[in-house]
Image: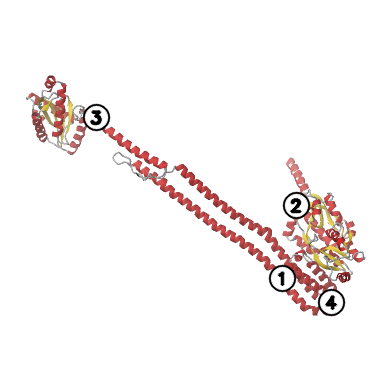
Amino acid sequence: MPIRPERYPANRLFALLGASFALLFTFVIVVLAVDQERVREASERLQQQTVPKIIRFQRLARNLDQLRQEGEQIFSSGTPEGRQQSLYLVMLVASHPSILEHSQAAAAARDTEAFLAETGRLATQDPAMLRVQQAEWQQLSRRLSMLVDDILVEGANLATADLEDVAGTMRVTRYKLMGATALLGGFLLLLMILLRRHLLRPLEKIDRALSSLSVDRPAPEFPDGSLAEIHAVEEATRRLHDAMVSNEAARRELQLLANRDDLTGLMNRRHFMESAATELRRAQRYGRPTAVALGDLDFFKSLNDTYGHGAGDAVLRTFAELLTESLRQSDLVCRYGGEEFAFLFPESTVGQARILVERFRERCAAHEIQLPDGLLVRVTLSIGLADASRCPIDLALQQADLALYEAKRLGRNRVVVAAETG
Amino acid sequence: MPAFRSLFLVAALWTGALQAADLRVAVLVQDAAQVSLQGDLVPSSTPGADLVAFTDELAREICRRIRSRCSVSYVTFGEILPGVEDGSFDLGFGNFLRAPKREKRVAFSEPIFRSASRLVGSPATARAFAGKLGQAVNLDNLRGARVAAMEGSQQQAFLNTIAAERELTVVATATTAGAFDTLRNGSADFALLPIRTGYALISHDKSRRFGFVGPAVADHGLGDTAHIILPRQKEALRRSVNQAIAEIRADGTGHRIMRRHFPVNLD
């Protein structure tokens, strides 16, 4: 027993795919939003914390440099008042909170202030002491300068560290964005492949099958699809083909019934006339010879009267079987009416047709027909033959009919050609 | 058209009235003698004249930035906070340090600069106390001294908290110049003053007898950021003032004002 492949309803499958896509998209959005929030936080930190810190470092550096400059002023000032003013400024600057809160700066400021106060005191007593103190001041001044540099670098490093942090976060965000784009692209590609494989291609096949659906062709074959709806359409297409074949068979049966004589199974007169007219048009278009004939069973009325209609019917059926066996496939024959039969012989001259009908007449005359009651009888046939190569079927049959009368008049069981009647 | 012109005039007047609100501004004086000047230029010969001029200019710049007409009053420190609290003043320029007790009474602006406190005294007194203490004088080891501070200031509040333990006598004065005077007349051994005020008074003093003693102190509520104070209910005004402070800091106006009155730029 073949394993039936599992099928899924398209609406559920697409709902599942849509939900998966929405989930994936939401996930990507959330990931990017988180990264964006990190960048925002880093930028805010840079703005709210780092930049003020850098400004504080710069101010501290400026204040320390101010301290150093005022120290230089003490050494370069020529008057005690000038030195005192500079010393006051040194004290003021050294007292500033920005210096106090930085341990290194506070220590350096404290040492500087103490040294400069002592220098001021000594210089008031003896201005020559300034030169004595100069060497130590140079060291202090250098220490202040280096501290200023260190603090400036420290401030700059703060910015660098934060900016690197922001850049790193943005770099990671870029990678994630690229990854997310690739993931979404892959998902869309997969979706397109699935759509093409399970929806578009089956639909194309169904379209081709429907376009070429015909009773002359076998039922369309479809591979087993995964989508229940597609499978349903394929099944419907197969059923449609089956219905078409069935309808065609019924149509042919009906056509057969409409064209045949019920009793003998031969063509009926209407169908014979249509077929004969068509064949004559073809033959006359190409200049091919055609002959027609009308045959009538001799003394058939007496047979009916003597043995009954059942016997007459049996004779007609047997006669029809003989005709079918004796004539060529291409020849047309019909029950023209009662015991009268019409013939059309394509691709045959009157002479050739005469040979055929003569042979048949002889066979008929020699053939014993068994009646329903078991009695054996023989029937003869009179035939009028005419050329139909250059006239319509009606006219040709009229001529054949005249020849048939002539055959009856001459004694029956014979063939008379219309031309012979003059 | 006349109706349109009238409407425009009324709108312009109404808008102008809104923007040019009248504000009463209290500016801190350093000396009681400066109170009587009431907005006139303080003579540079008076103690702390530079500080008053600096505060006055800062107040007028902020008034200009917030598009207000300011009526400036020169008052002592002790009058500013109660005046702002009871609504007598809309803005108080007294370089107020933040303190929990103060924050319950008035609102504080964004910082205008940073400050610390330091003892001021004569070197001779400092040496004498150093001899008694066995080490150089500073605020942490000072004992048995008379210390002056401005009434209502953080310095006075701090001294009051340690006075009993350290056997200190706190001499309260109405102004910083008054605190400095106690040193001159010998009624106090030291004065605990904000560093700018201390600098202004020391450098202004012709006798050159006084200087800073010991290191500056920024903890114990004696240092940090200095602010403008406002009535607590005037939140919109506080926001406008903060905006003005940010602007004058960003465009360098604050530094220029400071440099006009001080030889160094400390903020």
Q: Residue furthest left?
A: A411
What is the crowding at mark 1: few (fewer than 14 residues within 10 Å), some, or many (at least 20)? some
A290 lies above or below A3:
above
> The disc labelled 4 sits on which kind of residue?
Leu
Q: Amino acid at mark 1?
A: Leu
Disc nearest the viewer among 2 and 1: 1
Instruction: Name the side, left or right, on which A277 lies relative to A85.
Output: left
Separation (CA) of disc 2 from disc 4:
52 Å
> Which numbered mark, 2 or 4, is in the foreground of this view?
4
What residue occupies the far top of the structure in this picture?
Answer: A305
- SS state under label 3: helix
Choose the circle earlier in sequence order: 1 or 3.
1
Instruction: Give the class, few, some or many, for how many residues have Cα within 10 Å of label 2's Cα (few <14, many ≥20).
Output: some
Q: CA distance from mark 2 to mark 1?
A: 39 Å
Marks 2/3: CA–CA distance: 108 Å
Residue linked to disc 3: A257
Q: Secondary structure at mark 2?
A: helix
Residue type at mark 3: give it.
Leu
Say which quadrant the N terminus of chain A sits in. top left
Mark 1 highlights which residue? Answer: A147
Residues at marks 2 and 1 on the same chain = no
Hey, what amino acid is under mark 2?
Ser
User: Dot 1: what SS?
Assistant: helix
Q: Which residue is mark 2?
A: B240
Residue position marked by numbered label 4 in the rendering: A122
